[in-house]
Amino acid sequence: MLTAGLADVAAPLSLDELDRSGFLGPLFESFGCPAGAQPRAFSAGQGVGCSHDGEWDVLELAAGNETLFLCGDATSSLDVARILTDRGALPEWGMVLVLSQSAGRGQLRRPWVSPRGNVYAALRLPADPPFTADYAALSVGCMLAEGFRTLGIPVQLKWPNDILLDDCKVGGILLEERAGIIIAGIGINCTFAPPVAQLRDGWAVRAASLLEKGYDLTPLALFASLVKNGRFWYLNEIRRAGHGAFPSCAERHLAWMGRGIVVHGGDVDDKPGRIAGLSSEGGLRVRFPDGERVILSGSIVPGS
């Protein structure tokens, strides 16, 4: 926990504020810590350790090789993750979770409305396929979808980087790469979803929160569970079988398979077709009236 914050990037976060934020929920069970334990009762032997790195005191909650950094209101989780990475503090699979964002960014660098109550996270990805491939964002989405599946939440993936539930967007993924290090920015609508007026006119599906869909989950418990279970899937199904198995695994989560869609931008523009699946490179296979093509960029919305 960044108890001193980060200058110009993240506000300090105290245990008292963390308690009041509603961020905790059934916190530490996801990390193998005692159920019902209160934060103040934790010691280094129970999964919490303290360190000091010049500008901040860090309270780290670790589960195996996973490290999670919590901080207060921030410019964005990606900004925090980059600082921690530059200082050697964020390992592969390391996570950052912030209470809110003032400068969150979404697809095509659009502003991302980020009030408290949702997941605003960053995850440092391993330097291994499929996360180093062209379909890295889709790989993260598939990993999260597998994590949602273990919670009984039947999300689907809107190619290439959105998470849907009942055809409504409940999450999104944005990748940033620098010096060979890839960090995924992940947003999930736990309690709040942006209104239609703030979405791209005509080219965005309606947003929704998990709460309005009947799932009452706190940001920390949800994200910790998604990463833990999604990583288990990656290690046991993808890395063991080889990353060439990824497209077929991802197709089971792909939204609108066989349904009519319209492709906007990218290789084709405003052209109707039907989703046929994924290519070996993670592109979207679409059957158009004049034949099948692989779409590598652009947006899709349901069609007739």
Image (cartoon, rainbow, N blue to C red):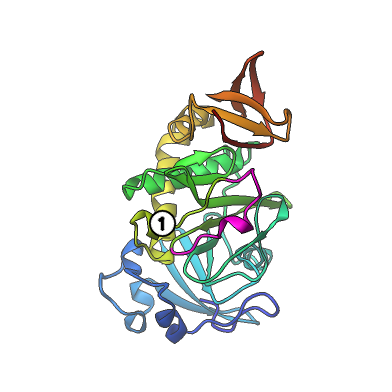
119 lies left or right of 295: left
Q: Main secondary structure of the magenta part?
A: loop
Residue named by callout 1:
210
Position of residue 172 measured from the top left corner of the image (x, y, whole percent): 56, 51
Q: Which residues are magenta?
A: 191-204
Q: Is residue 47 above or below residue 184?
A: below
Residue drawn at the location 37% of the way across and 54% of the way down: 213
The residue shown at (60%, 23%) is: 273
Q: Residue at x 57, y 30 (%)?
A: 261
- Quadrant where the C terminus is found in the figure: top right
- Horizontal placement of 214 versus 196: left or right? left
Q: Residue at x 48, y 47 (%)?
A: 168
Q: Is residue 183 visible?
A: yes
Q: Is residue 97 left or right of residue 177?
A: left
| Residue 185 horizontal/vertical position (percent) | 59, 56
Give whichever of 119, 4 is nearer the camera.
119
Q: Is residue 63 above or below residue 290?
A: below
Q: Nearer the viewer, residue 298 or 38?
A: 298
Q: Where in the figure is residue 136, as x and y percent of width and height?
A: 60, 41
